[in-house]
Amino acid sequence: MRKLLALALFLTSATIFAQGTITGTVIDSDMNAPLPGATVMVAGENTGTTTDFDGKFSINVERSSGKLQISFVGYKTQSIPFKVADGATRDLGRIIINVDDNALSEVIVVGSGVIDLEDDRRTPIAVSTITRSEIQKKASGNVEFPEIMKNTPSVYVSNQAGGFGDSQMFLRGFSQNNTAFLLNGQPINGMEDGNVYWSNWSGMSDIANAVQVQRGLGSSKLAISSVGGTVNIVTKATDKTEGGFARAMVGNGSYLKGTVGYDTGLDDNGWGFSFLLDHWQAHSKYADGTRGQGQNYFFSVGKVLGDHNFNFLLTGAPQWHDQNFSKSQDLYDQYGIKYNNNYGFLDGDYQTLRRNYYHKPVMNLNWDWNISENSDLSAVVYASFGRGGGTGDYGNGIGYVDNDNNPDTRGAYNFATDGLIDWNYIVNESNASIADGLSRDRIGTVLRASVNNHAWYGTVANYSYDTQTGWTFNVGGDLRFYTGDHFRQLTDLLGLQGRVEPLGGRPDDYVVSQTFNPNPWDALFNYADEDERIDYDYSEDINYQGGFAQVEYAADRFSVFFQGALSNQSYQRTDRGNFANTKESEKINKTGYNIKGGGSFNINEENIVFVNVGRYSRQPFLDNLFPSYDDNTMVAENGVDNEDITGFEAGYKFETTNFRANLNGYYTKWENRFLNAGGEYDQDGDGVVDFDDASFLFDGIGQLHKGLELDIHWKPTLGLTLNGYATVGNWEYDGSTNIRIRDENTSSFVDELEDIELTGTKVGLAPQTSFGLGADLDVTRDFSVDANVNHYADLYGFVDVEDVALSSISGDSYQSEKLDAYTLVDLGASYKFRFGNQNIQLRGNIYNLFDNEYINQSDQYGYFYGNGLTWNFSVRYNF
């Protein structure tokens, strides 16, 4: 319709006196090829046309000089000045227009009103956008999904060697449970603890249309639990055009992946269907003992009905993967950086101790209603059903590898050879020596799964009204209903007959013998009933109701906005495991809010400055309200108050035809934070570990994060794109805290440290200084190469509770361990064979090209080495 209107305007203008004629050819900068269908308009007039199949256009103009505005969906509008003599023809030659990485609203098929993208608001924010083409090239296959964001300012991804989907992402130094993640406008952070487990979303790289990283305050109108920022993941929906693809991929660690997808396009009745199926498997991620396997399915059906657009989506990524945890440097020195002490062999067959398995189908129905030229209504209704858990030992057969490489009193490792678990000893000697074949207390060893099943329903709706006079108003709501069940079940008896488990008032000699397969497909429907559960059994209900509103005024040179949200969250726990009769907690209600405001000023077409400020009052996570495992309904003694976050940021944007630069400064103060960490605890300070599995509960912590971010995008010549970023931060704890220590083996509190000073201690786990440089070069129309270099420095380790306490007592200022800086180089190349409307694309990636050895994180148990050299190669047929 837009093209027909432009063409009609052109034909009408041709009947009027013409000053001259302007011609030219519009070129797609990425493909270095003509761009058909681009709109060419005379600035300030209704005179326009579109480019033909070869990208050419011809337009009559009524003036001797002016500007042409050249635009196309997903591309930056190009302004070209012209001068032409009366009655003459002026050829502008090749006019190159660039893909607009930060303008995604035009390619969003559904959910346009509930997906808060940066360009939905005139007042700028600190933002980076990754498009589908880049995701498909660099983050598909044996690559963690968050790694697609690592080439943007203040983003850090670590623990990739932990196993498929076990990576962690940090934004401005804040962990991923303190960064908000939205899928098509739907919140996906865990309701209990805010965590995001990437293994549950392993298929996201196959179906993501775009990822937008909004650092700091962001543009989201929801009252979400965002401290570091907001990540908007926009999936593909029902495509408007017909087409499909098939892809095969291989990679290191015997990685294999196959994917097929097809879109019917929209038919004459407004219906369209899309689907995608995928399977992958591998013997290792990078470290030994990290096998994995999974699938990804996606189905979408869309319907256009007049001014209404509907889309139903179903997706899921069932998977299992074996895990690798942090270890002491001594163990790495002896067995190598790929060493993993979570597996071994039983009668020659591979056997793992730690396997994560999960299946989380997600369904959502999007509805967009274009009510009028001024108003729109959008809503999404969603549901997800998570099933699965993680395995581990239950009993005395497997312990820990200590720094002297000797087993402790309950160890079972082959230290003299490979440092792996001696499963034959556990099954054929330790368990075989138990006379009645029953595991009880800590006698005998079995394998269990800690199960986390949940059901989550919700809806988000937004009504938008644009007065067409500069004022825009939004109002909406956010409802969520969540129920989670937590218990343990047996997965392998390791030769025993059963487990004596007097859980929840059962007889003292009650035996559980039923085992369950740690498989994501089985986990959907086959899990332990209440009489087959072990160790613990409890549930929780979390309900959330929120409302939001936003008003913005935008003129030619400036814009201002104000946004506010208010929410209520209720929590309730039910304990079935610790009592003969089920016990239910009181219902706790917490009110939270956020307020944001800001403004921008356009100095001219190339220069913009902006300032945003915000205040959040965030409800605590449920796990912080109920800290006891002896009674899961017991509320924290002194209660847990809301956490308060204050944010301030300012920015400067400079943009020309082929160059873009953004400079942002931020100040984020986080007060009254609650932190729960784990580790070993030496209560007496005599060098002997008194509690090998302890939790440390910090309260009232303050953090202050300040920093500068610079990112640039430059196309110095046709076919070459350069990207770069640099970040400098200063992230420190602020104030003192009380620390309670709980023995997880007995679920009882064993110590409390009061008024422990943390002021000036560096926040760890993410680098406070980083910079990167990337280049994409189109050698020919069909052959391209790309490379990225990332450097990380000022990286600190986990705050060690015992060292903090000792430093505070002695009056010293504690500082966590500073890890070595490191640099990584990634390289990729693509080649495309074209034939008609079809093509075959070859793509290869090498990550950590120079195979550097580096530590990318340390926690309370030891160090995580990053991946060495890894690679993948794919062949994709597009039709």
Image (cartoon, grey):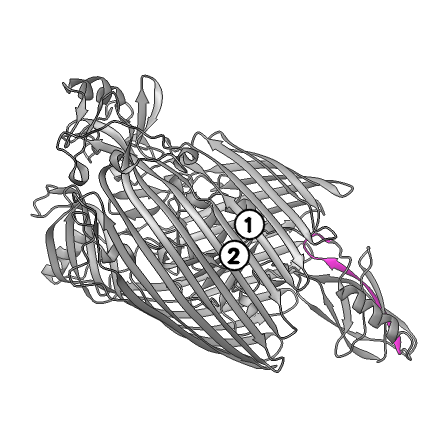
Residue occupying image coordinates x 34% and y 17%? 348
Can you see residue 669?
no
Q: Which residue is mark 2?
A: 184
- Looking at the image, residue 695 sits to the left or right of residue 486; the answer is left
Q: Which residue is mark 1?
A: 313
For the N terminus, the quadrant is bottom right
Give yes or no for residue 521 being in the magenta stretch: no
Give yes or no for residue 25 being in the magenta stretch: yes
Q: How busy is the neighbourhood of tag 1: few (under 14 within 10 Å), some, or many (20 plus)?
A: many
Label 1 or label 2, whichever lies nearer to me, is 1
- Looking at the image, residue 356 sits to the left or right of residue 143; the answer is left
Q: Which residues are magenta?
A: 19-32
Residue 194's spot in the image, x, y percent? 35, 55
Q: Nearer the viewer, residue 282 or 548?
A: 548
Chain-order first, disc 1 or disc 2? 2
Secondary structure at numbered mark 1: strand
- Locate residue 533: give its quadrant: top left
Q: Nearer the viewer, residue 622 or 350?
A: 622
Q: Nearer the viewer, residue 426 or 339?
A: 426
Residue 225's spot in the image, x, y percent? 37, 62
For the C terminus, the quadrant is top right
